[in-house]
Amino acid sequence: MKKLIIAIAFLLLGSSWVNAQAQTAEPPNNMTEIAAYSVFASNYRNKEYKRALKYGRWILKSMPKEIEGYPSFDLAKNLGRFVKIYKQLAEEADDPSTKSAYIDTVQTIYNEVFETFDKDEIYLFAWKIGQGRFYQDNADIIGDDAEQMAMDAYAKAFELDAEKLATSYEGYYLKILLRDLANKETDEAQKKAISIMKEAEEYANDDLNDYFDRIRDKLFDEPEERIAYLEQKLKKDPKNIDVIEQLRDQYKDQGNTKKVQKLNKRLYKLDPSYQNIIALAKFASSNDNYKQSVKYLKEAIDKTDDAEKLKTIYYNIADAQLNLGELKQAANYAKKAINEAPEWGRPYLKLAVIYARAVRKCTQNRDLTKNDRAVYWVVVDYVKKGKEVDSSVAKRANTLLESYRPVTPSSQDVFFSDKWEKGNQIKASSLGKCYSWINETTTVR
């Protein structure tokens, strides 16, 4: 009985569009149109929505585009007021059937607006956005079709003003439209999403373009499709660094090193930044082009003052010059790495290897003398120091110690040397002309 009473009361109020159609098109209480409209507008402004409906419901039936004596009357504006009224009443309604009826009325008002007006009479774009939001906000009442109806409204808004949808609301409605199309995973939806992004690109900011790229990653099933798209995009905008980076990453994933390097060079010419220089250095090193690697790494030094980056640059230069046989220069950069990061073990081990290589180079065509062996004391010193400051290199350090300790001077070498006595300091540079550049001191064992 209670539900029946509520339903009857609702019908009497005429809250739904059907009820509105059932009412007379004449203003209530024999009022003139202008008088009834004035009372309606006043109550609307005061948020007396149910009272406003009593004096304004006739507008919904007759849909007058003008009121005699009131030249500034705007039907579309007032239909927007009715949308707000019924949405508010729906929000306040406790009874589900009453709430649903109010929601139905709003839907019908939107439909009437689009049937009554064309784009030259009202700003249809804003109405479509409003309709889409309404469907989303009330999906639990409208039903399963609400989400799709919202997407259809946003798609129509895009057709009406692509630039506006891309630039307003931070691209929010365009993003959810594209997300919906991507999730459908059909050829038709994919084509539509690609078409929309293609048209909207010229209006999109960096954030929205990044979103476009994420959507495309989802849409393109094959890497070849993504590469083809990026190549086409780069053709239109040859200096677009972001596109070049994306295309380079795609080629990298495909193992196409030739094209990766070509794009690395292109990026370097457009923007000789630290990252782009390092990319060239890494590529050169991976292809054993150490001379080229050193060139780029030295250039990168001036591009950063970050200690972490600098220590790595110095270390990599030392490694490259070691491979080139430029031992003195390699040692200098290993020491730079140590100065930049004293608690990093790897450059100590690298310096040890450099000095060990010096002994091999100096003794290519002869046997080791006790002086040659003494240089290995310097080598062992640096291995032990690296292990001491950085436990993460302990395994590598132990392997090196196993190799170098056996070739250090024997106890007999020390005993029969006039100038060596256990605990004394000796300079590596004094152990032979070939070692004159090794400015290190070690202790006699």
Image (cartoon, rainbow, N blue to C red):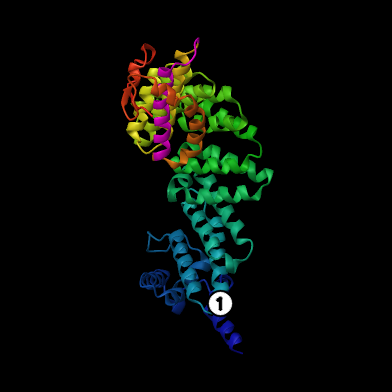
Q: Is residue 38 left or right of residue 27?
A: left
Q: Position of residue 263 (x, y in %)?
A: 51, 24
171 vs 39: above or below: above
Q: Nearer the viewer, residue 176 or 338?
A: 338
In the structure shown, which secondary structural element does the residue marked by tag 1 occupy?
Answer: helix
Q: Nearer the viewer, residue 368 or 139?
A: 368
Q: Position of residue 198 (x, y in %)?
A: 55, 37
Residue depicted at 58% across the width and 69% down the height: 141
Secondary structure mainly formed by the magenta segment? helix
Q: Quadrant of the N terminus?
A: bottom right
What is the three-letter code of the residue carrying label 1? Thr
The range drawn in magenta is 365-388
How packed mark 1 is, by other alpha carbons closer than 10 Å (few <14, some 14-19, many 20 or more), is many
Residue depicted at 50% across the width and 27% down the height: 406
Residue denoted by label 1:
98
User: Is residue 54 visible to the viewer in this orientation of the structure?
Assistant: yes
Residue depicted at 58% across the width and 88% down the height: 2
Q: Position of residue 105 (x, y in %)?
A: 55, 68
Q: Nearer the viewer, residue 74 or 168?
A: 168
309 vs 8: above or below: above
Q: Residue at the top extreme?
A: 365
Q: Quadrant of the C terminus?
A: top left
